[in-house]
């Protein structure tokens, strides 16, 4: 049964079918082969029940918030505002790339949006200031991944729904690792440039100004609205998303960018992205229903238990599995297709599902910069507009190493992820 399920999924994806369609077909195949009754009559109830989950309402709101920020010019002012404070470190504006990605991630919740937005702002400076293309582009691809670790994060919402873990706790758990990851990214850039000064270009020479500081205010205000309201216990993640969206509308209106063209473009982008995400989520719910009913999840968990591996060996195997899958599957598909199977194994091995949520998101981040399917690699290359693709791939490898170091740190010090959620609960 396990072999049939895995083989069928690989074949369906290899045929080029949309992920949601592949998951739905797989559910029907498994239900017909191993179930007492066909699962199709239950499809309507499952889809309706999943689509009315209140928490999922936050997904389109976070997407629209990021669209409005992108189109209202907030990202550009954030980049210019933070540059004078970090570009004097060895590595120059590559630190600006990382810091801007971290700040924009704290409002957009999307790695793809973060990578595309900051790359558009940064790439023109690469040749003008004489930076090594490989490390510079790698900093953009890796920095963009912070969009799904630093809250608010759309991927954390989906993990919370699928693994039945509090999204508020996940946001708190991802905060310190996300900031530490950004610091480690900057650290590897500084170290590389100290070892080989030819990698670094010239500084922009920008000096701190009041106008630059004011350019950071919109991002900070939205972060306070969204994340601050959750941590203060004033709002649920869905309510916080609504607050953030209202704030984004207010910022766009204040900047006189809330015109008809901007709204139509933002609504269209939100509708496209939301439709794609929700279709995959609903298909995954249907597949999960079938897997539970035919006993596939129990069979996989039992198989792992029979191998008599230590918890660390199980975790190592899971990390290796995701590194391999990340080479061939897009992150959303990989996340939704595997979470219901992997999380019970992790829990059985004695790991906290909240802690694993942070490890899991880092593995998803790694998939974004792992060739040949790493989405952020293609986004940065597309924004670059030419040159060898291997530059982006090679430049991302040091940051992939940093991600593995971060996972080791989380294994050695689990409180990096668990301390903040416990502190907010008074534990």
Image: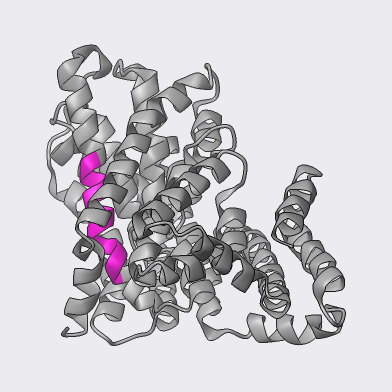
Task: Indicate the quadrant where residue 95 lies.
Answer: top left
Per the rendered image, the range of residues in magenta is: 172-184
Q: Is residue 413 left or right of residue 377?
A: left
Q: Nearer the viewer, residue 283 or 107?
A: 283
Residue 22, relative to residue 183: is it above or below?
below
Q: Nearer the viewer, residue 51 or 217?
A: 51
Q: Residue at left 54%, top 25%? A: 385
Spot occupied by residue 34 in the image (x, y as percentages of width and height): 81, 72
Instruction: Identify the image quadrant of the N terminus.
Output: bottom right
Name the main secondary structure of what is drawn in magenta: helix
Spot occupied by residue 103 in the image (x, y as percentages of width and height): 29, 53
Task: Indicate the quadrant where residue 234 lies.
Answer: bottom left
Instruction: Identify the image quadrant of the C terminus.
Output: bottom left
Q: Nearer the viewer, residue 351 or 397?
A: 351
Q: Is residue 218 magenta?
A: no
Q: Residue at left 62%, top 61%? A: 337
Spot occupied by residue 164 in the image (x, y as percentages of width and height): 48, 79
**Is residue 218 in view?**
no
Residue 222, relative to residue 72: is it above or below?
below
Q: Residue at left 59%, top 63%? A: 336
Q: Is residue 182 magenta?
A: yes
Q: Nearer the viewer, residue 335 or 88?
A: 335
Q: Is residue 289 left or right of residue 302?
A: right
């Amino acid at each position: 049964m396990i072999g049939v399920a895995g083989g069928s999924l690989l074949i369906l994806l290899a045929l080029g079918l949309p992920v949601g369609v592949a998951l739905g077909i797989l559910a029907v195949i498994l239900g017909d082969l191993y179930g007492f009754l066909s699962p199709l009559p239950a499809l309507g109830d499952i889809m309706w029940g999943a689509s009315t989950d209140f928490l999922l309402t936050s997904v389109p709101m976070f997407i629209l918030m990021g669209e409005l920020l992108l189109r209202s010019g907030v990202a550009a002012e954030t980049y210019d505002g933070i540059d004078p404070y970090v570009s004097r470190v060895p590595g120059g504006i590559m630190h600006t790339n990382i810091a801007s990605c971290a700040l924009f991630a704290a409002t957009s919740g999307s790695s793809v949006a973060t990578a595309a937005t900051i790359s558009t702002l940064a790439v023109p400076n690469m040749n003008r200031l004489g930076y090594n293309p490989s490390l510079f582009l790698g900093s953009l691809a890796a920095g963009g991944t912070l969009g799904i670790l630093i809250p608010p994060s759309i991927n954390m919402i989906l993990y919370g729904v699928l693994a039945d873990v509090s999204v508020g706790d996940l946001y708190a758990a991802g905060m310190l690792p996300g900031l530490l990851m950004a610091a480690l990214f900057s650290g590897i850039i500084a170290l590389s440039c100290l070892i080989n000064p030819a990698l670094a270009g010239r500084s922009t020479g920008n000096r701190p100004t009041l106008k630059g500081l004011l350019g950071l205010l919109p991002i900070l205000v939205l972060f306070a609205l969204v994340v601050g309201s959750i941590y203060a216990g004033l709002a649920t993640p869905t309510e916080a998303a609504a607050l953030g969206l209202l704030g984004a509308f207010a910022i766009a209106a204040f900047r006189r960018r809330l015109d008809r063209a901007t709204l139509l473009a933002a609504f269209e982008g939100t509708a496209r992205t939301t439709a794609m995400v929700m279709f995959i989520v609903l298909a995954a719910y249907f597949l999960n229903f079938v897997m539970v009913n035919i006993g596939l999840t129990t069979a996989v968990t039992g198989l792992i238990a029979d191998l008599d591996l230590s918890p660390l060996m199980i975790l190592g195997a899971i990390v290796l599995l995701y590194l391999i899958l990340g080479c061939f599957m897009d992150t959303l598909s990989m996340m939704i297709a595997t979470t219901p199977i992997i999380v019970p194994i992790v829990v059985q091995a004695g790991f906290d599902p909240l802690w694993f949520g942070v490890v899991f998101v880092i593995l998803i981040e790694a998939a974004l910069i792992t060739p040949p399917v790493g989405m952020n690699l293609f986004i940065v290359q597309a924004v670059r507009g030419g040159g060898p693709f291997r530059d982006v791939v090679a430049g991302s490898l040091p940051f992939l190493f940093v991600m593995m170091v971060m996972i080791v740190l989380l294994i050695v010090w689990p409180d990096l992820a668990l301390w903040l959620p416990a502190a907010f609960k008074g534990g």
